[in-house]
Image (spheres, coloured by chain):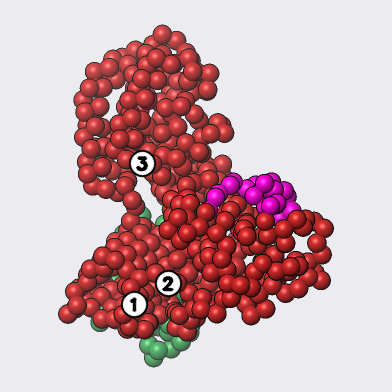
Chain colours: A green, B red
């Protein structure tokens, strides 16, 4: 996959990478934590990514921690993607963040995939 | 006949990780501490004199079991030392052990028995016997007059031929044991709660809306539980004591520990919830929930709103009264050589950190002594009480460093405060009694103790500056 844009958000708490899966799908890799201190940066950065893509897969294979603010940020990203006639899938959730998705029933809102390639393929 | 239960030196690293602060023998098996199953077993075998050797310095165990009169038992407690061999434990309790037949329960395990099938005439035996579990789980029987070190238990008879030991070696083993008892062995043990129908155990003072709640057997609910509208308690769920479950939340196949709040619209399936730890019962993976409105621990007295209101009122009063002296002290700052800084401390037991303003008194001179007498070094912290970030009286804030982390693990129910209870004894982190003072406060916290602490703190600060100086409170 071609890395088209890298954004280090200035601290070690969270990093976001936009990677190009194909012409249609942008893969956003989230590294670190998504909580109240980083959620606004994620939302802001995602709005920039929307200029390039409409369909996204969030690769959460290195997302260590997420709280309610983080879930809210993901929901905001999903809302903005669907508003732009696109969609947003989640892939590669680690066991700990997955537990939060389970208890809050967030998996009913998001399409959660075990595998990144499967998530990308499901857009085609 | 007597029984010695050794609860010291328990090997249970999984428990330390996923349920920090829980004394291993207080691990709940269907809302009942593991230790209580041992005590029931002793009672069923006609043993009335029980000694528990424990490592937990708090009075939690004594408060829970007392001295055992309600079960017709005589329970005594002694502190043990980690690392002691069983032989040494028996020697240390030789007066208790020497003059009668002795059953010894040693280790962290579950004993599978059926209350109706225990023969009360089985004990005492005429010869030594043992029931060996895994690496560190054993039960021994020693006839009167025999010495533990002189018996070869490897060739001894098997004790209780019909009984088996279940190891509690992992989260999964613990969870499966709970499920097995709830689904198949309810009649084997004395279980807490009223039970009109098979598979339903409901404690005292359980409030729920019968028209908007759904229950599926088997389940167990402890005492003082509130279930809000549209809650579902599905099969194989165990809800502890003093639990609040908010509306439209579904629990299935899960264990919810005492003192827990579960937010609304959650789905807890095959999980164990302890404080704010969410533990996957099938994989053993755990996750600390940061949002209190999802999952949190209901604290006992410290969270009480009236208690907090009193604390905030007193803090506001102190802020008003101390305003002029503190302003004057700032005027004399160049002469006093006070050092103002911000240091990172732990905000709560979860390891969340907070920066607190610190005034360091590096030198004992006239100005500084009066500054210290009036406790003006605490003045900047009072605002944090109004914001709800600190208590007025509680634990001394623990610095967020590697040493502090060790202390944090030992102070259960940690609440940092402007006035730390150990300070009335001029006790600081280097003091051996520091931790005992902290733990004592957490288990005896009340309005009376709070006022007493404020009075003693003010009195000692004003009249015993020299004592604080000697104990290192004036430092650079």
Residue A27 sits inside the magenta stretch: no
Tell which of B467 and B371 is nearer to you.
Answer: B467
**Residue position for label 2:** B191
- Callout 2: few (<14), some (14-19), or many (20+) C-alpha neighbours within 10 Å? some
The circle on residue B445 is 3
**What is the distance, in whole Å, between disc 3 and disc 1 at their CAs?**
35 Å
Residue B76 sits inside the magenta stretch: yes
Which quarter shows the N terminus of chain B? Answer: bottom right
Mark 2: secondary structure: loop
**Residue position for label 1:** B195
Query: Do the residues under discs 2 and 1 have CB atoms within 8 angstroms?
Result: yes
Q: In front: mark 3 or mark 2?
A: 2
| The quarter of the displayed image where residue B150 is located | bottom right
- Give residue B209's position: percent from left, percent from top: 19, 74
| The quarter of the displayed image where residue B420 is located | top left
Mark 1: secondary structure: loop
- Chain part drawn in magenta: B75-99
| The quarter of the displayed image where residue A70 is located | bottom left
């Amino acid at each position: 996959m071609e890395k088209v844009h890298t954004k280090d958000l200035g601290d070690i708490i969270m990093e976001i990478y936009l990677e190009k899966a194909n012409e249609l799908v942008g893969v956003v890799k989230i590294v670190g934590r998504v909580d109240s201190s980083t959620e606004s940066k994620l939302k802001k950065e995602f709005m920039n990514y929307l200029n390039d893509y409409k369909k996204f897969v969030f690769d959460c294979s290195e997302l260590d921690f997420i709280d309610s603010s983080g879930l809210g940020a993901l929901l905001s990203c999903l809302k903005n993607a669907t508003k732009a006639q696109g969609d947003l899938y989640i892939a590669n959730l680690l066991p700990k963040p997955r537990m939060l998705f389970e208890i809050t029933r967030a998996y009913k809102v998001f399409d959660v995939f075990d595998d990144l390639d499967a998530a990308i393929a499901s857009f085609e | 006949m007597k029984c010695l239960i050794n609860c010291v030196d328990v090997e249970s690293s999984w428990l330390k990780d996923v349920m920090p602060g829980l004394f291993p023998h207080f691990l709940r098996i269907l809302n009942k501490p593991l230790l209580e199953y041992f005590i029931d077993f002793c009672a069923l075998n006609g043993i009335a004199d029980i000694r528990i050797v424990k490592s937990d310095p708090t009075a939690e165990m004594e408060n829970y079991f007392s001295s055992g009169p309600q079960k017709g038992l005589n329970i005594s407690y002694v502190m043990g030392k980690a690392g002691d061999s069983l032989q040494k434990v028996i020697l240390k309790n030789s007066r208790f052990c020497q003059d009668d037949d002795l059953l010894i329960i040693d280790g962290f395990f579950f004993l599978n028995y059926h209350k109706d099938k225990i023969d009360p005439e089985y004990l005492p035996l005429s010869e030594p016997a043992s029931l060996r579990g895994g690496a560190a789980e054993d039960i021994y029987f020693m006839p009167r007059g025999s010495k533990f070190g002189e018996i070869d238990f490897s060739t001894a008879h098997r004790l209780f031929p019909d009984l088996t030991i279940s190891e509690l070696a992992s989260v999964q083993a613990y969870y499966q044991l709970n499920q097995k008892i709830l689904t198949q062995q309810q009649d084997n043990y004395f279980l807490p709660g009223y039970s009109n129908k098979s598979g339903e155990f409901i404690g005292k003072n359980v409030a729920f809306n019968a028209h908007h709640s759904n229950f599926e057997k088997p389940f167990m609910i402890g005492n003082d539980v509130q279930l809000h509208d549209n809650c579902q308690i599905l099969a194989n769920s165990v809800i502890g004591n003093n639990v609040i479950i908010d509306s439209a939340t579904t629990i299935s196949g899960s264990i919810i520990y005492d003192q827990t709040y579960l937010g609304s619209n959650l789905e807890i399936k095959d999980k164990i919830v302890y404080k704010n730890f969410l533990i996957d019962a099938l994989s053993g993976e755990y996750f600390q929930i940061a949002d209190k409105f999802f999952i949190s621990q209901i604290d006992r007295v410290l969270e009480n709103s009236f208690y907090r209101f009193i604390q905030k009122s007193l803090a506001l009063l102190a802020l008003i009264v101390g305003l002029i002296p503190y302003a004057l002290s700032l005027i004399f700052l160049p002469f006093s050589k006070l050092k103002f800084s911000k240091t990172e401390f732990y905000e709560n037991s979860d390891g969340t950190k907070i920066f607190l303003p610190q005034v360091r008194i590096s030198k004992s001179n006239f100005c500084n002594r009066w500054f210290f007498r009036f406790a003006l070094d605490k003045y900047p912290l009072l605002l944090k009480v109004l914001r709800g970030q600190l208590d007025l009286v509680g634990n001394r804030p623990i610095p967020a460093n590697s040493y502090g982390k060790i202390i944090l693990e030992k102070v259960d129910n940690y609440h940092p405060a402007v006035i730390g209870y150990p300070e009335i004894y001029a006790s600081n982190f280097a003091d051996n009694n520091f931790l005992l003072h902290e733990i004592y406060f957490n288990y005896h916290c009340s309005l009376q103790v709070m006022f007493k602490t404020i009075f003693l703190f003010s009195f000692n600060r004003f009249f015993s500056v020299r004592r604080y100086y000697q104990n290192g409170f004036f430092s650079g």
